Amino acid sequence: MPVAALGAGLALDKDKNTMNAPVDVRQLIPIHPIDISKSGGWAQFATLARAMRTSPQRWALISLPVGSVLVIGAIAAGQVRLNAWQGAFYDALQQHDLGTFLHQLAVFMVIVAVLLSLVVAQTWLTEVFKVRLRGWLTRDLLGEWLRPKRAYLFTFAGEIAVNPDQRIHEDARHLTELSADLGNGLVQASLLLVSFIGVLWGLSAQVIFNVDGNEFSIPGYMVWCALAYASAGSWLTWRVGRPLIPLNTDHYAREAELRFALVRVADHAESVALYQGEADERGVLDNILGAVLSISRKLAGGLARLTWVTSGYGWLVIVAPFVMAAPGYFSGRLTLGALMIVVGAFTQIQGSLRWFVDNFARIADWRATLMRVVAMREALRSVESLNAGDARITLAEHPEGKLSLEKVEAYLPGSLAECAILDEKDVEIGAGEYVLVTGETAAGKATFFLALAGLWPWGKGTIRLPPRDDMMFLPQQPYLPLGTLRATICYPAAPTSFGEPAMLAALSRVGLERLADSLDREARWDKDLSLDEQQSLAFARVLLHAPKWVLFNDALSALDRTQRKSVMEAFGRELAGTTVISAGRGNLEEGFYTKTLHLRRCPRT
């Protein structure tokens, strides 16, 4: 039987004068955050490439770009033919040759029809590649994030662990779209450059200079002009646009914080209204919005400065080839048609060489997004090594299927300078025992509970557990997934794992008969049900799964005396023989337990 997930919002022990509410543990643990921001773009790209190489989908992800490159090559050949067509067309205009003019129009229609078909094919290949690449990348990130315990441990990874939903959903989508578009653009620019550079080199011989009556030509003159013009523009673009990369990274982080804050207010609208905290929430949101707008203003300034370069460069290139080829035309060596071929080839080469100039803002965006995605992936793969220098609790499986605690100390949140420790140094719990873990407020019962679940590694000693499939952990705030009530009550098993009569019996046993007709209704059950109903539903899961071991942490705190009595009776009937370990508040009647353990807070040894 699958192990039940520990729900979100598990409260950790805090100061005695504070409420027992969820704590942002990321602020409580002195960790060494994971940071790959200093690694280069190629190293980050290579990280994803290696992951893709081992993916079962690698052939689909490779075949589509290969097909796209072949189509782009055909488009480049068509562009060369179209540029050559200009010579005959413009010469016909210059010579007032109507027959040749009409013939060239027919040739033009054929060339355009072929190019149009190729462009449509390229668009289809690119869009399908985007879909498949996003599917692979998102599933890869989800797979790394949802490995056992990793999503929880990741919350301790520092700044990089904030808003993982943003990186998995939005950043993965944005990265795949930018990668496909920029990759296609780079390949197309490269092929056009190779295709037209020979054409332009040959035509450069017809650009004749006359100095003091001496005529001469410069080999590859127009090519060198194109290279010099593009190099100057690219260098200036890089100098002006380089600050956009860190600005984009910061911008995405601030936007994610704003969205998270808005969702949090929406999820807790009732509590905000009861506390009359709207003004305070508005102030908090306004501060976060201010940070977003501040970085947006910096981005706006950076983009404006970059536009001076890119737009000015684009306007000048309209006349630049005519000016550079003018000596050949006015000397009579170049016809109008030949001039237009030179200008067309120069424009194509410029379009290829200025690809970097035109796309620098998008490249900066791609670099920032790539950094965020790869940083999360690498952090997830390294999360088990967080604070590797600190002592760790050893987890092992008990050979006899029992639970034993050998000199266990669980370091408490904060500075990790204090620990939760049992008065009973060595404890062994066997099948069918009912164990109560007691302790004063802030003694560390919640932390101890997490240590038993293997989610709190900081401490020392050895915990030997029965098979994990035999255990179910119930936190104070149950996790109720999105979907139907049928899926919720069966979680984490599939809805088909249990028959409907068993589900209805479990609901009736915990006093939720009114939900019998709602098994197939989809709802936000964490919003529709009160806390006591949520805890009752969580216990209905226990009845369905019938685990051999049940561990509670405040999991019955919202139930009244009658409801707790019903739980006690269940352990004598449906769950007879199940071992119970209970910590926190809201425990069953004291006479129910067969063993009591005493937990206390003390300085770390």
Image: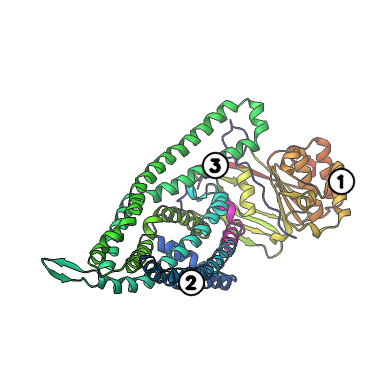
Q: Quadrant of the N terminus?
A: bottom right
Q: Disc 3 versus disc 1: distance between alpha carbons?
A: 51 Å
Instruction: Point out which mark residue 458 bears.
Output: none
Closest to the camera, between mark 2 and mark 1, is: 2
User: Vertical placement of 112 versus 176: above or below?
Assistant: below
Closest to the camera, between mark 3 and mark 2, is: 2
User: Vertical placement of 356 versus 114: above or below?
Assistant: above
Q: Nearer the viewer, residue 131 or 70?
A: 70
Q: Position of residue 56 (x, y in %)?
A: 60, 71
- In this rendering, position of residue 103 left or right of residue 579: left
Q: Nearer the viewer, residue 241 or 200?
A: 200
- Dot 3 alpha-carbon crowd within 10 angstroms: few under 14, some 14 to 19, many 20 or more: some
What secondary structure is marked by label 2? helix
Residue 220 visible at all: no
User: Vertical placement of 246 versus 465: above or below?
Assistant: above
Q: Which residue matches tag 1?
A: 517
Q: Earlier in the sequence, mark 3 or mark 2?
A: 2
- In this rendering, position of residue 149 left or right of residue 510: left
- Does the magenta stretch mainly form a helix, a strand or a loop? helix
Q: Which residue matches tag 3?
A: 602
Contact, CB < 8 Å: mark 2 with mark 1?
A: no
What secondary structure is marked by label 1? helix
Instruction: Point out which mark residue 107 bears.
Output: 2
Q: Residue at x 47, y 39 (%)?
A: 292
How many marks do you count on the picture? 3
What secondary structure is marked by label 3? strand
Q: Earlier in the sequence, mark 2 or mark 1?
A: 2
**Region in magenta:** 134-154
Q: Earlier in the sequence, mark 3 or mark 1?
A: 1
- Location of residue 577 (image quadrant): bottom right
Q: Label 3 is placed on what type of residue?
A: Cys
Residue 478 visible at all: yes
